[in-house]
Image (cartoon, rainbow, N blue to C red):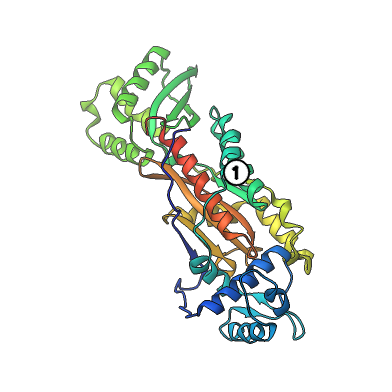
Amino acid sequence: MAERKRGKPKYRTSTGGNGEQETIALGAREEAILKSVIREHVLTGEPIGSRTVSRGPRLDLSPATIRSVMADLEEHGLLTRPHASAGRLPTTKAYRLYVDRLISPPRINADQSKAIDAALLGHHGEITDLLEEVSRQLSRFSNQVGVVLAPEIHRIIVEHLEFVRLDPHRVVAILVGRSGVVHNRILQVDAPIEQSELDDIGRYLSAEFRGRTLPEIRRILEHRLSEDRAAYDLLLARSLELGRRTVEAETAEAEVFVEGALKLVGNPEFSDDPGKIRELLAMLERKKTLVDLLSRVLRQEGVQVVIGEGNSGEGLARCSVVAATYGADGLVMGTLGIVGPTRMEYAKAIALVDYLAQLLSSYFSGPEN
């Protein structure tokens, strides 16, 4: 893959509603204790008490002081208790503050980046294989669910158009994108067309529309076809008509690759209600909710962190999604991300998503970039 300069990933959070985020002023001691509670809860999945926090590194505070601060954090809506005698759990608001202000700049581990590069190296020929491997690597290194939304055909930059005659009334239209993505469709034709004529049509359309997206090509063709058709000779008229039918909007559902769905089963967040995990697994199997969620990210810049109730759809209210877009030449082509419980290692997830999004963007941009 082409090398690409990587800096600190940009990311933002969302929790639904009107998108506004409450600003909470915390002192250094409150921030340290909140970070400790979240880190311990991420590791154990259990409510965290003051004694557990007091044993943490760099906290020279008594359990009594920690209990007092934790009570204050509870009043701020950052911690909650499942029952009076238990320790405390971070809230969605706490995770949002943690991601926005408390985690260190996300950086991928060097050994992980080498392993990912090696895994993707063998999947340059087939786009489908490459995207499946990306979802596997996301799941492998996050221990959560890895998802990749494949490039939608209307986002493809056209490099080449070709037509192959099947029989007198059927033609295969072959559309090749700049990145190597190939789409085929069979077209019915009223009048027979010889292969030599199809070759001429392919050469003309390729030269005319190389470097454009399908919506751009469709607008140009529709405009030309609306003009006086008598002004065109037969070959040009057929070229325009075949071109128009080739780039008509696809109606097929967007393809999404999902890896590691069963990794959610062991999380304690779902152990209290088996129905919830069944609902979540069914949603991942249907994939439509994931496609809708990832498609929303297509309109955003940088790594997006959608926490808890900000996720619409059955089964996702207890989950977080870390996602980013990939593309080429300034054009967004698809999305990739990680789905897991709100008790997630966000810094690791952000770094993984950012790294793989940049790798895919490098691939689709081609070696010259």
Residue on which the image places disc 1: 112
Badge 1 density bin: few <14, some 14–19, many ≥20, Cα 10 Å = few
Relative placement, left or right, of 359 versus 227 is right
Which residue is at a point 49% across and 58% down the rendered structure image?
105
Near-viewer residue (229 or 117):
117
Q: Could you tell me if residue 232 is visible in this image?
A: yes
Q: Quadrant of residue 235?
A: top left
Three-letter amino acid code at disc 1? Gln
Q: Position of residue 144 (x, y in %)?
A: 66, 53
Q: Position of residue 167 (x, y in %)?
A: 51, 17
Which residue is at a point 42% across and 39% down the rendered structure image?
4
In this view, 164 is above or below 113: above
Q: Position of residue 78 (x, y in %)?
A: 58, 78
Near-viewer residue (317 or 55):
55
Q: In what element is the residue under mark 1?
A: helix
Q: Position of residue 14 (x, y in %)?
A: 50, 66
Q: Could you tell me if residue 152 is visible in this image?
A: no
